[in-house]
Amino acid sequence: MKASVIARDLALKVPNFVQRTPAASGWVREVLSEAFVRSRREYRTILDGLDFRFDDGDRVAILGRNGAGKTTLLRVLSGAFQPTSGTVVLNGTRQALLNLSLGFNQNATVRENIFLRGTAMGLSLSTMSELAGAILDFAGLSAVAQHRLLTLSSGQRMRLGFAISTAVQHDIMLMDEWFGAGDASFVNKARTRLSDRVDGCRIMIMASHNLQTVRKTCNRGLVLDGGRQVFLGPVEQAIDAYKAIYQALPGYVPRREKRPVKAKKRKATAPRERGKTPAA
């Protein structure tokens, strides 16, 4: 079966609790009012009526301003969020590089967390048992395998999460920006592994603000604005649609394009002889 990602009229609404504005004047009365005024629940639409289909070979960039719904859409596709209405169907195994600490337990050992995170990804205990040694080696944590996770630095936890998340090749890859954190030596081998996983997957969907990376990596683009689908098509046209959103904003100031500096032509001069100065 071919891999595919299909969404039909996909929508997501989440509850939002809003504190009512107190009617009392003066800071003392206002503080007292805040303590007793009840908040009201409102529903906020994060994604609204998305329709798309991605198939084998697609490398998709999700573009949009901050708050447009890019990361939320990736979480829906990963199964972390269930849509309020509409449908989303994924054919193929999926791998999400969204939250590298998902499924971790601070009081468990590093090795135990490999099994916890692996089962959260849907991998069997026997598979994780086979992969544990390679994961520890890749993350550079073999010496602290029996230490509690809380004793590790944030950089070490990030390396562990990446090593686990990319230990197995999947059909569908979901990414929130291209990975580039950590010390130089780890970043180099992480980029190599990530490139291998992207080349080996059948569909890649990535949210990014880096247009250079988008042009280099993707062939299609999905543009979101305010949770709604604005454009879906070839990546260059998607980038143009993304830029048009910014250009329509009040107070938009276009960046000045850097023009190539022309080299000044030097005037031809007669060669000087050594030890002589030009005549006055």
Image (cartoon, rainbow, N blue to C red):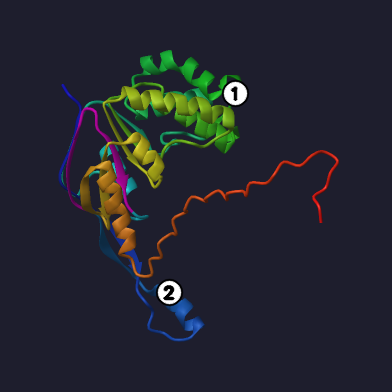
Q: Amino acid at mark 2?
A: Glu
Image quadrant assignment for residue 60: top left
Residue lying at 57% horizontally and 23% vertically, measured from the top left: 141
Under tag 1, what secondary structure? helix
- Residue 276: x and y in percent read 84, 44
Queried whether the magenta region covers residue 49, the answer comes back as yes
Residue at the spot of label 1: 144
In the rendered image, which quarter is residue 228 located in? bottom left
* Amino acid carrying mark 1 in the image: Val
Q: Which mark is residue 184?
A: none
Q: CA distance from mark 2 to mark 1?
A: 49 Å
Q: Position of residue 144 (x, y in %)?
A: 59, 23
Q: Is residue 214 above or below residue 140?
A: below
- In the image, residue 156 sits, relative to residue 229, either above or below, namely above
Marks 2 and 1, the one that precedes in the sequence: 2
Magenta-colored stretch includes residue 251:
no
User: For this view, does 142 lie left or right of residue 272?
Assistant: left
Look at mark 2 in the image and give the residue it sits on: 34
Most foreground residue, 136 or 49: 49
Q: Main secondary structure of the magenta part?
A: strand
Q: Residue at x 50, y 82 (%)?
A: 27
Residue 84 is situated, as x and y percent measured from the top left of the image, at: 19, 49
Q: Which residues are magenta?
A: 48-64
Of the pair 257 and 174, the residue shown nearer to us: 257
Q: Secondary structure at mark 2?
A: helix
Q: How many other residues sit within 10 Å of disc 2, few (<14), some (14-19) or many (≥20)?
A: some
Residue located at (49% from left, 36% from top): 180
Residue 150 seen from this side: yes
Looking at the picture, does residue 129 appear above or below residue 40?
A: above
Answer with the quarter of the image where residue 245 lies: bottom left
Between label 2 and label 1, give the one nearer the viewer: 1
Q: Is residue 14 left or right of residue 164?
A: left
